[in-house]
Amino acid sequence: MITSENILKRYNEIRAYTENIFRPLKTEDYVAQPITETSPPKWSLGHTTWFFETFVLKKFKKDYQLYNEDYPLLFNSYYNYEGNRISRHKRGDLTRPTVEEVFQYRHSVDQEMIAFMQEDLTEEATNFIELGLQHEQQHQELFWTDLKYTFSLNPLFPKYEGRFPFSSHTYFNNPMKFIKMPEGIYEIGHKENAFCYDNELGAHKVYLHDFQIADRPVTNAEYLEFMNDGGYQNFDHWHDEAWYWLQQEHISSPLYWHKKEGKWMNYSLTGLQPLNPDQLVTHISYYEAFAFARWKGMRLPTEFEWEAASSKFEWGKRWEWTESAYLPYPGYKRAEGAVGEYNGKFMVNQKVLRGASIYTSPGHSRYTYRNFFHPLARWQFSGIRLAK
Amino acid sequence: MITSENILKRYNEIRAYTENIFRPLKTEDYVAQPITETSPPKWSLGHTTWFFETFVLKKFKKDYQLYNEDYPLLFNSYYNYEGNRISRHKRGDLTRPTVEEVFQYRHSVDQEMIAFMQEDLTEEATNFIELGLQHEQQHQELFWTDLKYTFSLNPLFPKYEGRFPFSSHTYFNNPMKFIKMPEGIYEIGHKENAFCYDNELGAHKVYLHDFQIADRPVTNAEYLEFMNDGGYQNFDHWHDEAWYWLQQEHISSPLYWHKKEGKWMNYSLTGLQPLNPDQLVTHISYYEAFAFARWKGMRLPTEFEWEAASSKFEWGKRWEWTESAYLPYPGYKRAEGAVGEYNGKFMVNQKVLRGASIYTSPGHSRYTYRNFFHPLARWQFSGIRLAK
Amino acid sequence: MITSENILKRYNEIRAYTENIFRPLKTEDYVAQPITETSPPKWSLGHTTWFFETFVLKKFKKDYQLYNEDYPLLFNSYYNYEGNRISRHKRGDLTRPTVEEVFQYRHSVDQEMIAFMQEDLTEEATNFIELGLQHEQQHQELFWTDLKYTFSLNPLFPKYEGRFPFSSHTYFNNPMKFIKMPEGIYEIGHKENAFCYDNELGAHKVYLHDFQIADRPVTNAEYLEFMNDGGYQNFDHWHDEAWYWLQQEHISSPLYWHKKEGKWMNYSLTGLQPLNPDQLVTHISYYEAFAFARWKGMRLPTEFEWEAASSKFEWGKRWEWTESAYLPYPGYKRAEGAVGEYNGKFMVNQKVLRGASIYTSPGHSRYTYRNFFHPLARWQFSGIRLAK
Amino acid sequence: MITSENILKRYNEIRAYTENIFRPLKTEDYVAQPITETSPPKWSLGHTTWFFETFVLKKFKKDYQLYNEDYPLLFNSYYNYEGNRISRHKRGDLTRPTVEEVFQYRHSVDQEMIAFMQEDLTEEATNFIELGLQHEQQHQELFWTDLKYTFSLNPLFPKYEGRFPFSSHTYFNNPMKFIKMPEGIYEIGHKENAFCYDNELGAHKVYLHDFQIADRPVTNAEYLEFMNDGGYQNFDHWHDEAWYWLQQEHISSPLYWHKKEGKWMNYSLTGLQPLNPDQLVTHISYYEAFAFARWKGMRLPTEFEWEAASSKFEWGKRWEWTESAYLPYPGYKRAEGAVGEYNGKFMVNQKVLRGASIYTSPGHSRYTYRNFFHPLARWQFSGIRLAK
C-alpha cells in the first residue's frame, strides 16, 4: 500500500533508475524522432518531470512558481486540460533546451518534490505522486523501444553502451503445451488495495466458455515456419486491412529482421546479430500475431481468457497481443479533469496487450494490467501466445 | 426455413425489388463514385449479379459459360479467392459496360438462375442462393445510402424521383424512458433454424451486470441540445482520435445538415428541407454517438446488452452504434474459400451496429444481426440509443 | 479578320462541330472524371456554353436572364472574378444536370447568341465571341484527350464509335534530317491582324545562336531504341525530379503502351492494337522528351528556335515539347478582369509546347501558338522534335 | 586564377571558416532536420568532407583508403554516380556518428588533403579541389538558412551564440530609383579565366528590349504597404498555383514574421525583435515577389536584364528572385560523370535568383552566378528587385 512514508523512497529510486538508463546515451541520441509514435529521449526526460510539476507541485504546493513558463508548451504530451502544446510529431525539431538544461529542470523539480514529500502529505497528493511514478516507469520502457527504433534506422547499427537492467532469459526450446480452462464465470479487473490505472477498475464478472491457452509465447523458430510456409504471401491468413498494409509497407518479416546473404539477422540494442531461433519472437503487429494464429489453426486469447488463466503460466517476457479491443470495463469511470485523459480517451481502434516485457520496469507489472496499441504497431516488445 | 420450393419465389421478388428501386434513376446517376466507400449504382447492379454467377452458376451448374470473361475483373468486390479486380476506388471511372448492358447481364443471369432453380437443388446450392439474396438485400440498403451521399454533394440537391419502399414513421416527442435489465447470464447469437450470417453464429453465454437501456433512439431535438451546449467544441466529450478528426474534417454537425440563414436544414432524398426536431437523429459517426452519450452522462450499450434487451423496446428505424468492437464470437468458424471472406476478414478496427433502418429491406432484419462500420462512417442510416 | 458578318457563320460551324464529336458517346461516357486534370464531357459541354453566357450575353445583352442561377457554380472553371465554383476534382461527382439538360442549356444559349449576333455587334463583343470560339476549339481537342484517358483505364478498352474528324497521316520511315539555322536576331510573337491569345502578343526580338532542328518528330521505332537501350533505367538521362517520378509512378514506357506476351500494344480510340513503329511517338511527358534527347546526344529546341524555323518544316501532328518554360513575353499585358485569368496566371512551373496535333480543330493552329502543360503531363497528344 | 600555390591557402581558410561558424552550436543543434529541404549541421559537416574524399582523394590519391566504408552511404547527397545513400528526408534520424566523430572525420580528411596538395597537383585535381571549396561555401550559407529555420520553430526562439561573419548594412529609407537600360544585344554568361559553375558557361548573346530596373531591393516598409492593401487576400495578384498554396499553407506574411499584440515581430538569429521597416524584406517566395511586383504595376527582371544592368546598381544583400526559369544556356554542356550531376539535373521547375546575400561567404559572389530554388521556397535570404 502507498503511504507517505514509502513514497519518498520510491520516488528517489524510480527517478534514479531513469537517469541510470539514459546516461549512457550520447547527447545526439537525445534529439531524434524518426516517427510520430516515438519520442526523443530528451523530451521523455522533460515530460516525466513536467508531469510531477503539473499534477503535484502546481496543484498542491503553495505559491509554487513554474521552473520555466515555456516548458508546459514543450513537455505536455496530450492533456487538453493543461493547454496548448507543440504537435506530437514535432518533438524532434526542438534542439533546445539542451540535454543538460533538461537535467537541470529535472533536478530542480526533484528538489522541490523531495521537500514537498517531507511535509504532511494528503492522500490525494500521495495518489498523484504514485501516478507520476507509474507514468515514469511506462516511459522507462518506452525509452528502450524508442531508442531501439531510432538506432535500427542507422546503417551503422549502433549499440546501447550501458548495462541492461534485466537478466531474464527469453529462450525456449521445449514443446508448447496447452492449459485447459473450464467454462464458467470469472472475475476480471483490479480489486486489491494497491495502485492500478483507472482502466483496470470496474472489477466485474465475465462468462467464459472452455478454452485452452499456451504455456509460453511463440519462438522465432515457430514463427519462421509460418514465414517459410508463405505466411506473408497468402491473403487467407490476414485481415483485409492487414493485407493492404502488408502490400503498401512491403512487410514480409518482423521488424528489425534483415536477410543478409540468405541468413536471417536481427537488430537489437546489442547490435546486428544472427537470429536466435529459440528466442521469443517480438516486434510483430497484432495483424501478424493474428495471421500466425490463424495459419496455426488457432487464435489469440481474449484479454479475459488471458487474465483468468494467468496464474497458470509464466508471463512477463513479451507484451502479448490479445483478440480484445481496448474498451471500458462495465463500471469504468473516467476521472475528472486532466487525469481523466490518461486512459479513457484512447479507448477506440486499439488492441489490448497483456503481460509485460523484459524491459518493463521492476514492480510495474500486474496480471490485471491493460496495455494498448494500434493493431499495426511493431516497435513495442510484443509477442504471441496462442489459444484455442 | 429455406427450401427449394420457396427459394425461386424469393429470388424473383428480391431481384425485382432491386430493379424497382434502381429504375427511377437517370442514366448519369448510375456512374459516379465520389468516395471509395460508396459504389456507383451500375457497379452494384453488376456486382450482385456477379455474386450469383460466381457462387451459384459457375460452381453448381454444369458447363456454365461466363456471360463475359471480363466481368469478374469489373464486378468482384473483395474476394481474393476469386482473382484480380479493379481497385475499389476506381469503380466510378468505368463508363462501360453501359447501364443497359449491365441490365442485360442481369437478365441473362436471372434466366440461367431460374432455369437452375427449377432443377433439383442441393441443400448446398440452396444455401448459396440464399446467401446471394441476403447479399442483394444488403446492397439494396447501400443503394439508398450511396445515392444519398452522391446527390448530397450536388449544389442542385436532386431528389429521388421514384416511390420510397417504406412508410415507417421516425418521429418521436415522448420522453425517453429507460428499461432496467437485471444482472445475470444471457445467451447471445443466432440459434434458430433460419438464415443468418456466419458472424452471428457461435451462440454463447455472456455475463451482464445490471444496466438500463433507452426505449427509443435520440431525436434531432435532443442532439441539438448537445450542439447548442458546445458539444462539438469541448474536447472532454471526445475520444482523442475523434477530436483530431473533428478539427481536420471541420465537422460540427451531423452529415447532411446545412445552416442557411441561421436555420438548420437537412438534405434527404426528398430534397433540402427544414430540420424536423422530432425526427430520430441520423448520419452520425460512432465518435459523435459516443460524445453525445458522454455529454449526457451516459454511455452506449454493448452489443450484448442491446441483444439481451432487444425484445423490450422497438427497434429497426436506425442502425444503432454500440460500444462493442466487431470481433468474432467465441465459437466463430470462418467458412472455407471465398465465402469465408464475407465477414471474418473485416473483424478489426470496426464497431458493431445493431438493429436495422427504415431503408433495410423487408425480411432482412434480426435481433442477432451484426452490422459493422468504421467509427468515423457517417453515410449510413446510423443513430444513437443510450444506456447507463 | 473577324467581322460581325462572318462571326455568326463561324459560331454555327464551331458549335456544330462540338456536337458532332460528342454525340457518338453513350450517356455514361459523359460523367466520369478519373483524374483532376481531365474533365467529364458533360462538364465541358456546359462549361463552353457558360463561357458565352458569361462573357457575351451577361455582359453585352440587355436584361439577359441567366438560364439557371446555379449553373455558374457548376460550370465556371477557374475564373475567380466570376465567383465560387465546385472544386475542379469534383466535376465527376455531379450526375445532374443530365446530359440532355446540358444540351438544352446549350441550345438555349445558342438561340440567344444567334439572335444577339444578328443585332449590331460592337467590336468588343465580337472579340469576346471570337475568344469563346477559340476557347471552344481548345475544349474540342481536350474532348479527345480526356475521353482517351478515361477509356484507357477500362479493362474493356472501349472504342470511340463515331467518325474521326481528320485524315492526316502520322507515319514516317524516312531518315530524320536536320535544318540549319543561322545565328542572328529573329522576331517572335504574333503580329498579324487576326485572332491570337494574349500570351502570343508582345512581339519582340530574340538573339539566337546557330542551331539545327529536325525536319520531323520522333517515331515509335526511334523511341523504342531508347527504351531497348535501357533509357528508363539509366538515371543519367533524367532530371532529378523526373527520376523520382519514374520510380514513384513505376513508369517505363509512354502512356497507353501495354506489353502483352512480349509484344508492345498501343491503346488508342480505335482500340488496343499492335504498336506501329512508323507512327510518331506520343503521350510522353516533357521529362521523357528531354531524356530521349539527352540519350541521343541532342536537346529539345527552345520555343524561339521552333518558331524561327517553323516555316522550314512540316508540323501539326504532335504538340512538340520545347525546352522553354512558359513565361510572359517582354511586352505581355494581362487583360483586365476575368479574361485576364485566361493565360497569365498559369505562367509558372509549366513548359511550352509548340505546333498542333492531328486532333487540333481546323483553323485553330498558328506557328505563334503557345500551348503549355506541366512537365509530367502525358495525356495530351505530345511528341518530340530534336535540336542540336 | 586558381593555382596549386594558392589552393592550399584557400583550402585552409575556407575549411576553418566552416568550423568557426559551426562551433558556437550546442551538440543538440547539429541533429535536427525539421523539413526535407534543410539538412542537419552534422550532416553538412560530413557531406562537405565526403565531397573532398570522393572527388579528390579517392579519385587522384594513389591507394587511398576510405576513412569509413559506411560514410558514403550517410554523406552522399544526390550523386547517383556515387551509389546508394540514405533518403534526403532521413538525415535527421541519424544520431550517429556523433558530432565529434564527424569532426574527426573532417580533420582526418583535412590532413590527407593538405598532404596531397603539397605534392605536384595536376590541373584537373586542382579544379576538383576548387569545386569542393566552392561547394563548401555554398554549404556555409545553407548553414545559416537551415539553422535559422530550425530555431524559428522553437517556442524558445533561440539565438545563435557566436559572432556573425559580416557587417554589411541592409537598411534603406531612400526612395527607390530606376535605372534605364537601352534596347540591344547583350553578352551573358561567364567569360573570365576564373572559377565558375558549369551553369554559367555558354556565354552568349541575348537581345533585350529597353527596360528599367530598381537601384535597390524592396524594404519591409514597402512590403507592408502591399500587405496592408490586402495583398495576400486578392487573388488577382497571384499565380493560380500560388493562390492555392496560400490557402493551403495559411500564408499571409513573409516567413518568420509574427504578429504579437497587433505589432509585427521578426525572428532572426539574434532572436525575436520588432520588425524594422527600413530593412530589406527577406524570406519571401517567388510567388510573393511576383505578387508584390504585380500589385505595384511592375514586374521582376529576367536574369538577363539583371546581369546586363548589374554593374549599375549595388547588389549582394539579398538573393533576388528573377522571372527567369532555371534553364541551360545555349551552349551548356553537362560534365561527364558524377560532377555533371551538380547542376544540370535540376534545370526544371525552378526559378533563378541573382546576386548574393549578406550570409554569402566572402569571395563567393559573381554577377554571373545563377542560384536556383523552387518558386515556393522561403527559407533562403531572398528578396525583391523591381523592373518595368
Image (cartoon, coloured by chain):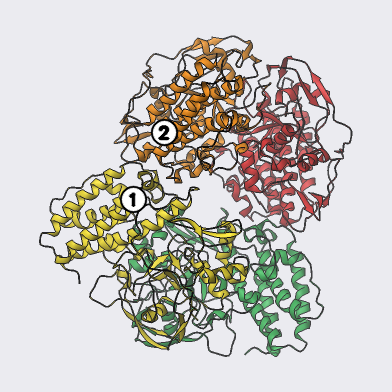
Chain colours: A red, B orange, C yellow, D green
Instruction: Determine the chain carrying the residue at label 1.
Output: C
C74 versus B43 height, above or below: below
Q: Amino acid at mark 2?
A: Ser
Instruction: Determine the chain carrying the residue at label 2.
Output: B
Image quadrant where residue D270 sits: bottom right
Which residue is identified by label 1?
Answer: C24
Q: Is residue A140 left or right of residue B11?
A: right
Image quadrant where residue C12 sits: bottom left
Residue D327 spot, x, y in % from top left:
49, 75
Q: Residue farthest to the right? A: A174
Residue D194 spot, x, y in % from top left:
59, 88
- Of residues C124 and D232, the one drawn nearer to the viewer in this rendering: C124
Q: Residues within 10 Å of mark 2 (few under 14, many from 20)?
A: some
Q: Amino acid at mark 1?
A: Pro
Residue B337 spot, x, y in % from top left:
65, 32
Which residue is identified by label 2?
Answer: B253
- Of residues B385 and B252, the one drawn nearer to the viewer in this rendering: B385
Discs 1, 2: same chain: no
D311 versus B84 height, above or below: below
- Of residues B316 and D232, the one drawn nearer to the viewer in this rendering: B316
Image quadrant where residue D304 sits: bottom left
